[in-house]
Amino acid sequence: MERAGLVNIDEDRCANLRWKGMFIPAEWDPTVPHGNDRLFWCHKTQMCLGLDGKLADDYECHEGRECYRAL
């Protein structure tokens, strides 16, 4: 079961942000930095970078970015 803290389905999450835990059950692994669910990518680019060339993750994808699309 994925950790509840990593399921950011708030109004401020970018609709294009994807992460591994959305698709498979990801057990928390305390031996891996940040667990094993911190693999983010942009739905539009299919890479770890957004359309603006900046990192795609739960902290960096916010309304201040040009490519941000609210849920």
Image: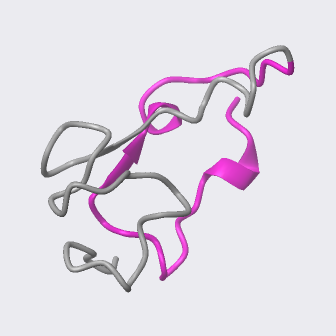
At 79% from the left and 18% from the top, the residue drawn is 29
Which colour assignment does the render follow? one colour
Residue 20 percent across, percent down from the top left:
46, 31
The secondary structure making up most of the magenta span is: loop
Observer-nearest residue: 25 or 70?
Answer: 70
Counting labels gives: 0
> Residue furthest toward the right?
30
Q: Quadrant of residue 1?
A: top right
Q: Is residue 55 above or below residue 68?
A: above
Q: Is residue 66 above or below residue 27?
A: below
Q: Quadrant of residue 16?
A: bottom left
Residue 4 percent across, percent down from the top left:
73, 50
> Residue furthest toward the front?
53
Observer-nearest residue: 28 or 24?
Answer: 28
Instruction: Tell me the quadrant of the picture where the C terminus can be found.
Output: bottom left
At 37% from the left and 52% from the top, the residue drawn is 56
User: Is 26 displayed left or right of 29 in the figure?
Assistant: left
Observer-nearest residue: 40 or 23?
Answer: 40
User: Is 59 displayed left or right of 70 in the figure?
Assistant: right
At 37% from the left and 51% from the top, the residue drawn is 55
Q: Quadrant of residue 69?
A: bottom left
Residue 69 magenta-highlighted: no
> Residue furthest toward the top?
31
Residue 61 percent across, percent down from the top left:
41, 66
Residue 14 magenta-highlighted: yes
At 21% from the left and 80% from the top, the residue drawn is 66
Range covered by the magenta-colored residues: 1-30
